[in-house]
Amino acid sequence: MTRRSWLQIVLVAALALSVLANFFLAGYVVKQHRLGVGGPGAMAEALVRTYPEEVRAEFRRLLRVNRPVTFAALRELRQARRALADAASATPYVQADAEQAMKRVRNATDALLEMMQRLLLEALRNTRATST
């Protein structure tokens, strides 16, 4: 075989692998999008899964009303996690930076959880007030 034919075989194989990898990645992204992984919907559903449908519906309504605040809290948590990953992989590694980044992640997580619980209490109050 000539050098040109080997190069063509390698290029075709690389193209085929690339197309195959793109299909798998596209499928993964679509699946994650359908599941709502990482978004406020997934967290919200996990938080209210055991409550009656009327409470869950009210909670989802309150999430929609408070969407900008919810997304801001999620954005802060993502940024804090990114900063932690950066601090953990920094060269040279500075433990104080990693600890500070961990504290920021804890604070962002606590703030998001507190906001979700506040909305859940409001949903409970709204549905309980109408049912009694």
Image: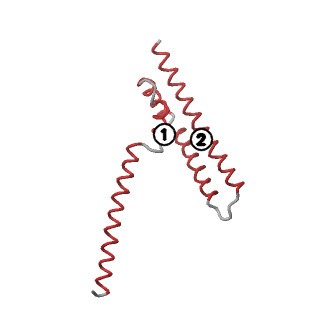
Tag 1: residue type?
Pro
Q: Residue at x 35, y 53 (%)?
A: 27
Q: Is residue 48 above or below residue 29?
A: above
Q: Quadrant of the N terminus?
A: bottom left
Disc count in the image?
A: 2
The residue where tag 1 is placed is 40
* Alpha carbon distance from label 1 to label 2: 12 Å
| Secondary structure of the residue carrying numbered label 1 | helix
| Secondary structure of the residue carrying numbered label 2 | helix
Give the numbered dot on residue 109: 2
Where is residue 91 drawn, in percent x and y?
Answer: 65, 65
Tag 2: residue type?
Thr
Where is residue 119 drawn, in percent x and y?
Answer: 53, 29
Q: Is residue 33 above or below residue 45?
A: below
Quadrant for residue 53, please give it. top left
Q: Is residue 2 left or right of residue 78?
A: left
Q: Residue at x 30, y 79 (%)?
A: 8
